[in-house]
């Protein structure tokens, strides 16, 4: 999937692919000013917040670095049937932002098609799950204090400006669930300065950082997006192995607490040998491939045949599907599925699984047989969850950002 944001981030940071993700701090400028407004604006963020039922902690507000109680900005809306729905009180939110505050929306990709498609493009690029959080700060107010994240971060400054300080890690590869606390930031500063609209910054996992608008004027504002990449680790792999060990009978037996020392030693040898074989058979590379192949897609609009014919689709798997070709046999591997298709259907499959929108009622003439294959395959892929109906709302997330595929 060719996405303008992914290409712009690579150019800004001087990367070729995602191999540098998590390796070291990097900063640059997006050479595509129109991209920012296409992705998000502060007013569009407020519109997203207004039209959805949200609750804390998905939406949060901070003043001078302190989190406000949800009752300061959330109100229950009672329907005529007496149901209470949590909604943002836009008048209160406006007053808070006018006086200087920070609005945080976690997982914005769940509410907006443009952000959804951007995160999916990032996932296909990085081979990792991605979530985008949005931060808007108004006035001369503090942001979050010095802290570190347990995932890699890409910061894209959408509007306004904000001062940042980035320090290195005080613990190598810290984790959310860890064996030691990680509470003391290092003194050395990696970078300190102001992010302005169009800037992008990569902060590796464990690097301490903070952002603020203090001293930048009461009439200013800042909106930035943070793309979070929670990477899979050796600990993740061991957890996955623990699930597979149940296939071997030796791991299902009780541990011999009351047996003789000789019998306990024998069981320990059996377990150790079985664990060695399990590790050899299911190494980290297999784990990474399996997780990517078996992750099921997020929810999408289903195809209801009674509503009309399938006229446009797009692949919405969390990661790019794998297409294996071996001796004329074609197999699609994705989302926990293995689908065999005829060799003559391979070109149509690659088009449908490209991540680009595909219109099944093309303006360009198409050979009749290929058209039939494309339509038949599209219906199968939608029913199996590899592709989704390309609604106008979903298509809006691709417009001017992802190349449209027209068969």
Image (cartoon, rainbow, N blue to C red):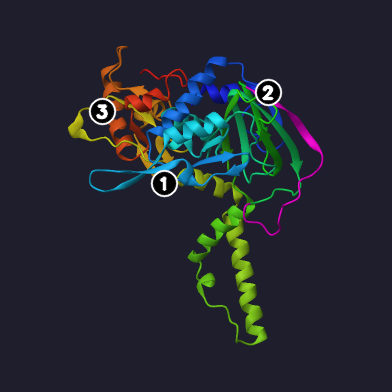
Residue 322: x and y in percent read 46, 37
Closer to the chain start, of discs 1 and 2, is 2
Magenta stretch contains residue 191: yes
Direction top: furthest residue: 364
* Sequence-first tag of 2 and 3: 2
Which residue, given by chain and number where applicable, does mark 3 sit on?
A: 310
User: What residue is shown with label 2?
Assistant: 28
Q: What is the secondary structure assignment of the residue under circle 3? A: loop
- Residue 403 drawn above or below residue 318: above
Q: Give the magenta part as a residue range.
A: 176-196
**Which marked residue is nearer to the observer: mark 1 or mark 3?**
3
Residue plotted at (35% across, 26% down): 393
Q: Residues within 10 Å of mark 1 (few under 14, many from 20)?
A: some
Residue at the spot x=23%, y=43% of the render? 80
Question: Please, is residue 252 above or below residue 216 in the view?
Answer: below
- In the picture of the structure, the residue carrying the numbered disc 1 is 336
Position of residue 169 in the picture relative to residue 134 (left or right): right
**Disc 2 versus disc 3: nearer the observer:** 2
Q: Secondary structure at mark 2?
A: strand
- Would you say residue 381 sits in the magenta stretch? no
The extreme left residue here reads 306
N-terminal of the two: label 1 or label 3? 3
Closer to the camera, 337 or 189? Answer: 189
């Amino acid at each position: 999937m060719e996405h303008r944001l992914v290409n712009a981030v690579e150019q800004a940071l001087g990367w070729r692919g995602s191999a540098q993700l998590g390796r070291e701090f990097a900063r640059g400028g997006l050479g595509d000013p129109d991209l920012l407004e296409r992705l998000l604006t502060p007013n569009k963020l407020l519109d997203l917040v207004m039209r959805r039922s949200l609750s804390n902690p998905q939406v949060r507000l901070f003043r001078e670095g302190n989190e406000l109680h949800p009752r300061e900005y959330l109100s229950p809306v009672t329907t005529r049937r007496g149901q209470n729905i949590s909604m943002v009180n836009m008048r209160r939110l406006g007053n808070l932002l006018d006086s200087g505050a920070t609005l945080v929306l976690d997982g914005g990709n769940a509410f907006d098609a443009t952000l959804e498609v951007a995160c999916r493009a990032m996932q296909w690029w990085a081979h990792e799950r991605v979530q985008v959080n949005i931060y808007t700060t108004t006035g001369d107010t503090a942001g979050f204090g010095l802290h570190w994240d347990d995932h890699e971060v890409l910061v894209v400054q959408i509007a306004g400006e904000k001062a940042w300080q980035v320090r290195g890690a005080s613990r190598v590869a810290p984790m959310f669930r860890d064996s030691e606390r990680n509470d003391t930031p290092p003194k050395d500063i990696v970078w300190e300065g102001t992010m302005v609209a169009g800037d992008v910054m990569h902060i590796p996992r464990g690097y301490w950082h903070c952002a603020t608008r203090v001293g930048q004027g009461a009439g200013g504002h800042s909106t930035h997006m943070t793309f979070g990449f929670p990477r899979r680790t050796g600990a993740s792999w061991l957890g996955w192995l623990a699930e597979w060990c149940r296939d071997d009978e030796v791991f299902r037996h009780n541990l011999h607490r009351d047996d003789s020392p000789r019998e306990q030693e024998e069981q320990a040898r059996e377990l150790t040998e079985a664990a060695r074989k399990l590790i050899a058979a299911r190494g980290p590379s297999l784990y990474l491939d399996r997780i990517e192949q078996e992750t099921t897609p997020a929810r999408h609009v289903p195809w209801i045949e009674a509503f009309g014919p399938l006229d446009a689709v797009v692949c919405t798997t969390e990661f790019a599907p794998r297409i294996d070709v071996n001796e004329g046999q074609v197999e699609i591997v994705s989302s926990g599925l293995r689908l065999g298709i005829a060799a003559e259907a391979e070109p149509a499959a690659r088009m449908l699984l490209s991540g680009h929108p595909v219109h099944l009622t093309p303006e360009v003439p198409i050979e009749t047989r290929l058209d039939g294959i494309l339509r038949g395959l599209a219906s199968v892929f939608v029913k199996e969850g590899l592709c989704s109906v390309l609604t106008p709302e979903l298509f809006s997330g691709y417009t001017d950002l992802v190349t449209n595929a027209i068969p």
